[in-house]
């Protein structure tokens, strides 16, 4: 019995407990205080009594009692919160379904379109993921006080403006689901695309995004884009072990040791993509998952079916006509039709401030033998790269390009 | 129920719509208002004269100082508003959507500090 046991329970149970307490108290800040109080009690008691058989239920019950104590002590607190709590049966059994509904309600509140994307992401990580403010601040390269203020403001807006805790109705769902999926995807890419050198934070973000996607898929098994997002994250996550070499360097997809991929995740992701294809109603996340399924299908990078990937990018571009999609399509086009045609496409894209644009451009320029321009493009990409591991990777590629031809 | 201010802002220098468009807008807003009264969401509403008609009163050393014109040099000025009752922000945003369609301008939604009694 160590502090680590309570810390594990914290990671696993915090989001669930907060979600339930928000329903009981109708207030996020009060719910967080109560759950934190309960974990303090756990730290004191669990070393003596041992970890309870149902740690989540124990935390919720204790948090509820702590909230009641707090109301009794502080008579200034709004009486209606106390009333709501006291009227509730304190030993109500925690049904699994009810807990999931609580989490889903809270997720839709955190990702309400009246909140900025930054606020949505921060709230989701804090309230559902149980990440603390310093962790979230590090993950998004924001000073800690800025992140703390962002969280306080967002919670205040939820309370003051009356953003409700409820799952949207069927007719609202498409519009309301979009920011939820975007937040989960953003959490994953923030972990995946290495903004800081702190490995632990990134792993946590990836794990949390996959966990949230699984929860969503379980809660909304008929929403194909939800299933598409989960499949996409599983297939990206399957390759995570091979993305870093023995010296901590970045290994791009084409050079990865494919035996290091997580086979179970690949199979689950591909199975999900096949099931989605049979439904025949492709959306952007489903198509991106399908692209990743084709990548993970190849035994080595030379065996990649680029023709199929290009077809999928054509479909994705029709569904989601953005310059970023056009850039990714150009990468596939270069493999199918050669670098010159792809370069012509890339040169038309308005993505000067987007680091991957310069990386792709540098690679295509190298391949068509325009070395000086390629080196300039690598320099521009390096200017836009903060992460040290990724910088080292680009410097290696720049050196290779410099030596070539 | 909470109370929300639905503020209609007009942007300075924007082209005036045609008389027909304005007539239609008045009719649409009146229909929206009638519906707000019928459903019990109505608290108060009003349209304002242009910002050039505004006077700002400031207290300096206990004396009222008057300034001709609106508060800020802002390009966006309050043109009219509704005060409506709604169960939560989602309900208020739906009213704002309908109000914005009726008046043909963006609508800012802000909650009042104190909840309405009912």
Image: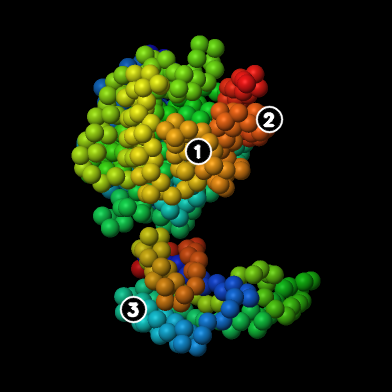
- Left/right placement of residue A185 relative to residue A57 reads right
Q: Which mark is residue B90?
A: none
Instruction: For mark 2, name the chain.
Output: A
| Residue A324 higher or lower than A12, as above or below | below
Query: Residue at (53%, 36%) from the top-left corner?
Result: A340
Give the camera-side residue of A245 and A166: A245
Circle 2 Cα neighbour tier, 10 Å, few/some/many (<14 / 14–19 / ≥20): few
Marks 2/3: CA–CA distance: 68 Å
Q: Are marks 1 and 2 in contact (CB under 8 Å)?
A: no
Q: Going by the image, does A190 lie left or right of A67?
A: right
Find the distance from the CA under tag 1 to the CA under tag 2: 19 Å
Q: Which quadrant is home to the C terminus of chain A?
A: top right
Up the image or down, A309 lies above or below B20; here it is above
Label 2 belongs to which residue? A372
Spot occupied by residue A361 in the image (x, y as percentages of width and height): 57, 35
Q: Name the residue under label 3.
A: B35
Tell me, yes or no, if residue A102 can be seen here.
Answer: no
- Tell which residue pokes out farthest to the right in this image: B61
Residue wearing tag 1:
A342
Same chain for mark 1 and mark 2? The answer is yes
Looking at the image, residue A354 lies above or below residue A208: below
Between A297 and A224, the one nearer to me in the picture:
A297
Q: Quadrant of residue A7?
A: top left
The quarter of the rendered structure image containing the N terminus of chain A is top left
Dot 1 or dot 2, earlier in sequence: 1
Of residue A3 and residue A331, the one placed in the foreground of this image is A331
Vertical arrangement, residue A147 with respect to residue B37, above or below: above
Residue A25, position in %: x, y? 36, 47
Q: Is mark 2 on a helix, strand or loop?
A: helix
């Amino acid at each position: 019995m160590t502090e680590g046991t309570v810390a594990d329970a914290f990671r696993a149970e915090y989001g669930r407990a907060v979600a339930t307490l928000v329903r009981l108290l109708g207030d996020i800040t009060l719910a967080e205080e109560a759950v934190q109080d309960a974990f303090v009690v756990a730290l004191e008691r669990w070393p003596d009594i041992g970890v309870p058989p149902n740690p989540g239920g124990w935390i919720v019950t204790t948090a509820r009692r702590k909230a009641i104590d707090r109301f009794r002590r502080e008579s200034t607190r709004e009486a209606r919160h106390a009333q709501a709590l006291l009227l509730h049966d304190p030993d109500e059994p925690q049904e699994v379904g009810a807990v999931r509904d609580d989490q889903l309600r809270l997720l839709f509140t955190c990702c309400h379109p009246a909140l900025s994307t930054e606020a949505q992401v921060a709230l989701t990580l804090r309230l559902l993921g149980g990440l603390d403010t310093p962790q979230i601040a590090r993950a998004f390269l924001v000073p800690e006080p800025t992140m703390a203020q962002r969280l306080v403001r967002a919670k205040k807006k939820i309370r003051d403006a009356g953003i409700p805790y409820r799952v949207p109705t069927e007719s609202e769902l498409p519009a309301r689901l979009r920011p939820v999926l975007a937040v989960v995807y953003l959490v994953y890419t923030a972990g995946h695309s290495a903004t800081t050198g702190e490995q632990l934070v990134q792993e946590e973000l990836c794990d949390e995004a996959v966990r949230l996607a699984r929860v969503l898929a379980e809660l909304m098994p008929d929403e194909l884009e939800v299933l598409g997002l989960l499949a996409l994250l599983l297939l990206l996550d399957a390759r995570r072990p091979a993305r870093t070499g023995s010296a901590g360097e970045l290994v791009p997809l084409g050079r990865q040791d494919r035996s290091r991929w997580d086979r179970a995740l690949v199979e689950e992701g591909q199975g999900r993509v096949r099931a989605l294809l049979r439904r025949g109603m492709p959306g952007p996340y489903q198509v991106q998952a399908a692209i990743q399924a084709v990548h993970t299908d190849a035994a080595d990078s030379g065996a990649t079916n680029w023709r199929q990937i290009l077809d999928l990018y054509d479909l994705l571009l029709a569904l989601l006509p953005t310059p970023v999609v056009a850039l990714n399509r150009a990468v596939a086009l270069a493999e199918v039709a050669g670098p010159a045609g792809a370069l012509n496409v890339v040169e038309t894209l308005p993505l000067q401030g987007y680091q991957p644009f310069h990386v792709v451009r540098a690679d295509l320029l190298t391949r068509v033998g325009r070395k000086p321009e390629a080196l300039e493009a690598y320099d521009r990409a390096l200017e836009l790269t903060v992460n040290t591991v990724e910088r080292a990777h680009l410097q290696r590629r720049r050196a290779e390009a410099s030596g070539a031809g | 129920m909470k109370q929300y201010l639905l503020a209609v802002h007009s942007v300075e220098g924007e082209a005036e719509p045609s008389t027909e468009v304005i007539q239609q807008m008045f009719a649409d807003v009146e229909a929206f208002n009638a519906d707000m009264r019928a459903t019990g969401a109505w608290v108060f509403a009003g349209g304002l004269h242009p910002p050039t008609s505004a006077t700002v009163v400031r207290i300096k050393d206990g004396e009222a100082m008057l300034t001709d014109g609106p508060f800020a040099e802002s390009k966006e000025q309050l043109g009219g508003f509704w005060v409506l009752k709604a169960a939560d922000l989602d309900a208020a945003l739906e009213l704002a959507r309908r109000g914005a369609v009726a008046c043909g301008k963006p609508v800012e939604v802000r909650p009042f500090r104190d909840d309405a009694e009912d």
